Structure formats: structure tokens, C-alpha cells
Amino acid sequence: MLTSQPTLLVGPSDWDAGIMPKQEFHRRIEALWRACPAATCAIVYGDRVNHAELAYFTNLVPKLEAAVAILSASDEHTIYVGGGPNMIGAARPLTWIWELIPLRGGQAIGRRAVESKAGTTAVPILVGGGYMSTALRQAIVEGTGGSAPRDETAKVWTLMRRATDYDGLAMYNAGVALGVAIDAIITACKKGAGVTDAILGGERAAYDNGAQDVRTLFSLNGGRTLQPFSAPTDRRLDPLQVYVAVRRFNYWAEGFYITSSRPQPALNKARELLRLALAAIKPGVDPASVEKLVVAAMKPYRCHPVTERALVSRIGIALEEPPCANASAALEPGEFCSVRVGITDEAHNHAIVSAMIRVRDEGLDVFWSGVPKPIKGSPP
Amino acid sequence: MNFAERLADIRARMQEEKLDLILGVHDGGHFIEKPNPVMVLSGFKSLGPTAALLHADGAIDLIVTPHWETDRAADACPDARVVGAHDVVDGALAKIKTSAVVGTTGLRGLPYDLASRLAAALPSALSADKLVFDAARTKTLDEITNARAAAGIAERGFERLLKIARPDMTEDELAVELKWYMKTLGAEDNFLLLCASPHNPAVQPSTGRRLQAGDIILAEITPSYRGQLTQICRTAVIGKPSNELASKYRLVVHSMDEGIAAARPGVAMSEVCRAINAVLEAEGYGEYCHPPHIRRRGHGLGFGSVRPGDVALDNTTVLEPDMLFMIHPNQYLPETGYLLCGEPVLLTERGAEPLTQEKAALGTIGIQD
């Protein structure tokens, strides 16, 4: 889900070898060379907003300025860190790569990428090139000698879908923090808290449980539309539709939830549809077919605009990982997804609920869900 | 000035430049130093990539992504024709007649994927960055009101820092707590640079380093209130400050005072920087008044326009009433390391009015034996 992007990231992001050991990063880089056999090095870009690929290979989530990693097939990796020499110290704890150099324009990066090793011709590839500013990209291309390196970002997205147990542990931790945040919101609402107190109470609970970042959306009109925090309000709302995304160890978990003291027909229907969607998900299934199934059972409601074309969305280091939403690629074992069902009668009844899942060989794990009772067929 | 008057100014400039349309685009990646033409033209702070099209007749089209953001955009910009789109470039181009003379703004801040598509689709478009951001060089009454509120939040944030910072807490924990606390006060975003060390080389983003007795904590506290950023720069020490640290901090504050005194309507911004440097140069710190030690002594405050730009020797912008900017000496001194000291100021007919209630002073954090 797209949420407000902070102007500066502040949460705990230091590399923790106990969570993501160096050999896991080496494995990922080796997989990159297998996917791109002609490449001798990769220029990998990331900034505050778009950094999933950079973090996947280096653990580095740039908090302030952009960074560019040069990954070498000969294992001599370097990261160019934006913001000048004084930013090196702040970047060092964020990554396992030791060689950090101030980023001073793109030409030096391009030149470094095409440095020949032992008489071989260097063949650089680009990852995350679409996120760069035009000026930086042009300078890098100039540095390489003029011909633009091939952009292989899509191949990295494919690699990222094949989650390992390390990814899984981080995701489950994010899911736990998400659950704590949602529980705190529910408790606050039951105690009569206003919207701001409830939402910020949830954010606080997530941070207290080690969250690196928390982003929230909520509805002031019974779930018809969602909005980010813009100013405090002590309005008490029943029902209160919320969206919470929690990041931990660089990985995101997200959830839609409605808290209400009264029966909500739309909520019950949305939960029923979510169960239907989850029951249909298994390896080899096309997310679009799951959406079709849900939409067919949706009457008298129609799809909520927030979840339109976004019923099954891959999630991990990025809050929404390409191929986004209901892309045609069939689900694979090991993938992490957010499954969202939103419905509306376009009048007064609206509801969005979701679940965090991991696709398994025989079905799926549900490790957070907006449905209160255990879902049939899923492990506890 | 109000928002409508600013738009009228932009339209007058469009007429001079013979533009039929200005297309402002922002990717939703809000950053303190990245001007946001969509906010200038519409007042809307978007979640995703968004385009604002200002026509010569004053009509405004606002193309928003994600498409479900239309209601919020319409609330923020009631006079605009708001369209939700799945793709901002396609949505914006659908609104542009092929014969129109188009000025574009914000393209330099866009990621290549967006910028290259727009550049290819509008090969003869002119840059309207200067036109739009010059018109937004002074703040509207609403922006000034919001800046005052943000300054109050920042000051309370620093009070909170002095109250809760303690040895063994990590920089990240302190930064997260402060950001959360200021959100409870109304800050929807915050550029919060915070770090600590007995001798800081610079101010940096927080890490997992644990605070220790004797640390000097640097904090650039920059809450945004209703889309308007305001900053204070503060320094605090854990434990009793040395006489030298206290003395050097007074020197930096004095240099800031001289900068504030120099900021008056009709004066070039470079003179503000010169006034700050003069105090430090007189004390023998001339070599630390220039790159690589220091690049600027302050800056404009977005998220909309970042005019009047940096407080720097090469900024010849002439100051005018209702300009809003930071004056922060933020100086590295060899005896103490980097020290942060800065106030947000509003230019008035009488000079620079700090928006803070209390001027920067070295904060102290008591530690129990």
C-alpha cells in the first residue's frame, strides 16, 4: 500500500548479523550472477523511498541521502554514500559491506563499474535505475563510457520473491509487531479513545516492540476513504477503519482492520470474502483468478477503490513489491503476500480487511489476519 | 499574501512567458530539500505521484495517484478538478492539448522512470521551475501560521529530549520517541536528524549507538505542521558541560545572533552568512567557515518552495518580508566537535523575527550517580 513517505527515516536499521547473516547476502549476490551470467558487476541504487533492491543485497536502507552499491562478481563490493564524507559513519552500521565511499556525482560510479579486472571486459548491469534522478543516471552512463548498462531490476524482483528462512523470520517479526499495534488500537477504541489517540497508541505499541517504521491510514467516514495523519482529532468513531504497516529488520507487514462495538454487515461480508480468498490461494494460482472469485461473490457490494486491482500483493523489503498487485505471475511457494478484501455499497457501508500470508507447498500460513477467528485450513 | 494571490502571481508570470499551461509533478517522496510544485499550485501533499496543471484561465486539474486519494485531494484543493489515476503521466498527458505551450516544473526531482516519460511526451516544453518557485518565495498567511505552530512543536520536542534522553538509550530509540511525541502534537512529518558523541564530526541520521555520559547530542528537529516544515537546531550534553563547551556554544549562539541581526528586507542573503562568519573568523575559526567544514548557514523551509534558498556566500537573493528560512551557524570547532544552533526566522519589515519562544542554549541532561 502506498502511504505517507517520511522526509527522513529514523527507526532502528543497523545490520544485525543474527537476523540476516553475511552468507545470506552472499547467496543473494551469487543468485544475481546466475540470473545475469554476462554481468561482471551491478550498479544498485536506493534512496529513502525506493531501496528494496539495495537493502536486499547490502542491508542498507538509506535514511537521508541516496546510496549506490557496486557489487562485483569478484566479491569486491563498494557502496557510494550520499551526503559527503561525514555521512560514512552513520551509514557503516547499516550494512555488512565495509568499503563505503562518499557519493560525488555519478561519473565516478560509472568509471568504477567498468574498471577492467585482469584483462577482462567489464559488463555492468543496473538495478533500480528507474528510481534515480535523470542527472545521476546520465552521469553514471557517461562514466561507463557512453552505453547505458542493461537494467535488470525485474530479475532482482524475481529473486526477491523466493524467500528464505531468514526473510521468513524477519517477516514473522514484523507480523508480531503489526499484531501488537492493531491490538493496541482495538484496546484504545474499547476504552473510548479518539481517533488520534487510538492510531498513535498503535504506532507507539509497534515501536515499543522494536518496529523500525510504522505507517498508518484511517478513515473518518466509516471506511469510505482512507487518509494519513494530518492533524490531531479527538473524534470517537465506531466503526473505525484502520490500515497499519509495520517494518522490522527491514521487512514490512501490513494489515487492514475495523474495530466496532456494533455488528457491521459489510465487515462480516468482507471477512467471509477474505476467507474465500485465502482458501483459494496455493502455489501455481494466479492472483487475478483469486480476485475474480472474490468479486463474483461480492454482491450486493462492489470492490472498494482502495483494494481494486490489489487483492493479492507481494510484500517484503518493499511495502508493495513488484510485480505489484494482481500481476499475472502465479504464486510460488515461499512468497509473502498481503491479501486484502475491500467492499463498499457506495453509500454508508464499507469494510476492508486483510491477512498476511506465506504461500506454502500445500497451501499457506496466515501469520496475521483481520479475521478474529482462526481460518479453516490454515495452521495455528 | 494568500494562496489565491500567489496563484494570480503565477498566472501573470505565465502570461509574460506566453505559457498556456504549467504542469507541476511530484512523486510523493517528500523531502526537506526537494521543492514540491504540486503543493505550491494546489496545496495538496500527496501520497503518490501527483500532477497539478494550472491553465492560463486559472483552472486547475489535479491528477492524483493512488486513484482513491481523490476525496482528500478535493478537500485540500476545492477549486481544482480532481481526477484519480492509475498512472500519473497518462493522466496528466490526457489533459494537455497538443497545441498548448507548456511549462513544466518539478521534473528534476522526479525519478528517471517518470521524468523520462514526461520529457519524451513533451519535447518542446519549457522549464517553469523558476517561474513557479520564485512566485512562492514568500510564504502565505496560512503557511506562516503553520510555521509558527511547527516551531512550537519543535521546541516542545527539544524539551522532551532533555527530559527523556539518558545513557544506554540508543540514538534510534530517542529519535523514534521524539518523532512519535511530536506527532501527538500535530506534526504529520519530521525531518529529525539526531546523533551523539563526545566529539561529533557532523550531524547525522541516528543509529543504534548507545548514549553515554559526556555525549553531546545534536538534534535538527524539523516538524511539519499541515505541510509546512519548521526547524530548530539544538545541542545538549549528558552530564555537566565543560567550561570550554559552554564557552564555545555561547560563541556559536553569538554568531547566530549576528546573522539574525543582519537579516533585513533589501539585504542579500549572502550578508547573513557573512555576518555569522565574521564572528567566528574573529575568534580564529576562519578555516572552519568554508567547505569542506561548512556549506551553508541556513536554508529555506519546504515542503512547497524552498526559496529563498541557502544562507550562503553565493546566494544573492534579496530578502523580502514574509520570507521564511533557517539561520543556523551549525559549526564544527576543533575543541568541541560539531555544535548545532539555529532558529527559524520570518522576515518582517523590521527584520528577522525568530519563530521560537526560547533561543538556542546548551541543554544539559542530568545523570544520576
Image (cartoon, coloured by chain):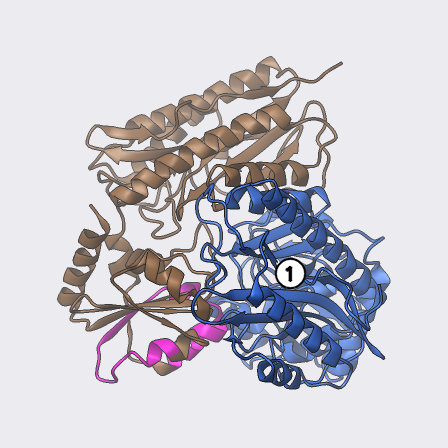
Indicate the secondary structure of the residue bearing disc 1: strand
* Viewer-proximal residue among A119 and B72: B72
x, y percent for residue B216: 62, 27
Residue identifier under label 1: A255
Q: Residue furthest front?
A: A263
What's the colour of chain B in the image? Answer: brown
Query: In this rendering, does residue A116 appear at all?
Result: no
Looking at the image, residue A330 sits to the left or right of residue B200; the answer is right
Quadrant in the rendering for residue A57:
bottom right
For the residue marked with disc 1, what is the amino acid? Answer: Gly
x, y percent for residue B199: 64, 30
x, y percent for residue B21: 23, 71
Q: How many marks?
A: 1
Question: The numbered mark 1 sits on a residue in which chain?
Answer: A
- Disc 1 packing (10 Å; few <14; some 14–19; many ≥20): many
> Against A180, is B110 above or below?
below
**Magenta highlight on residue B178:** no
> Which quadrant of the figure contains the C terminus of chain A?
bottom right
What's the colour of chain A in the image? Answer: blue
Q: What's drawn in magenta, residue-wise? A: B91-120
Residue visible at 43% across and 79% down in the picture: B117
> Against B207, is B10 above or below?
below
Query: In this rendering, does residue B299 appear at all?
Result: yes
Looking at the image, residue A76 sits to the left or right of residue A341; the answer is right
